[in-house]
Amino acid sequence: MDKSKIEQLKELNYLLLNCRSVDEGLKLVTNKLKNIIEVDRVSIFIYSKSANMLWTYLADGIEKLIIPADKGIVGYVVKNKTIKKVNDTSKEKLFYKEVDEMTGYETKNLLAVPLLDDNDDVIGVVELINKNEKFNQKDINIAYLFSKYISTPLLNILKHRKLNVGEDDDYFI
């Protein structure tokens, strides 16, 4: 990994710690990740185990999107708690093209990384979309580190909102 990317990664912690809100910090670090890996879009999906659904907490270019947790590459990542790299979505059986149809956006390649809590349970997935080059091991390493940076703050946001919204809200863990 080149030195400038390492320095940019170090900035993630600083950005999170110095924001007025965790929401604001997550948006900043997500944009930073987009620039570091040089992708067109980054999405953070939240997993609702009780509803067996995934919904976008942060997503470039779209409003909230809700999909079944057993569909697509994000569903695979949730089920297997593993990173999934797809450098050509047209050749990937798991690719859930209905999302592209709903959004009008064409996904050519993607990298999906699970977001895990302290008990190793999945709370969501970070998805990096459309890199001009193929995703490589450096990209996987950076995305993995990013997932570790944001999992705890994201879980804190979700727990706080669940308490404020109510237990019956299926969008929360």
Image: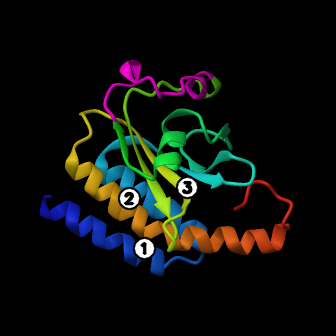
Query: Which quarter of the rendered picture does the C terminus lie within?
Result: bottom right
Q: Is residue 70 above or below residue 45?
A: above
Quarter of the rendering containing residue 136: top left
Which residue shows up at 43% across the image and 55% down it? 31
Mark 2 to mark 1: distance in Å? 9 Å
Q: Amino acid at mark 1?
A: Leu
- The residue that label 1 is drawn on is 15
Question: Label 2: few (<14), some or many (≥20) within 10 Å?
Answer: some
Region in magenta: 86-101
Name the mark nearer the viewer: 3 or 1. Answer: 3
Which of marks 1 and 3 precedes in the sequence?
1
Q: Is residue 76 above or below residue 102?
A: below
User: Quick check: is 122 in the magenta stretch?
Assistant: no
User: Quick check: is 100 in the magenta stretch?
Assistant: yes
- The residue that label 3 is drawn on is 124
Q: Please state the total of marks drawn on the protein image.
A: 3
Counting from the top left corner in percent of width and height, residue 115 is at 48, 59
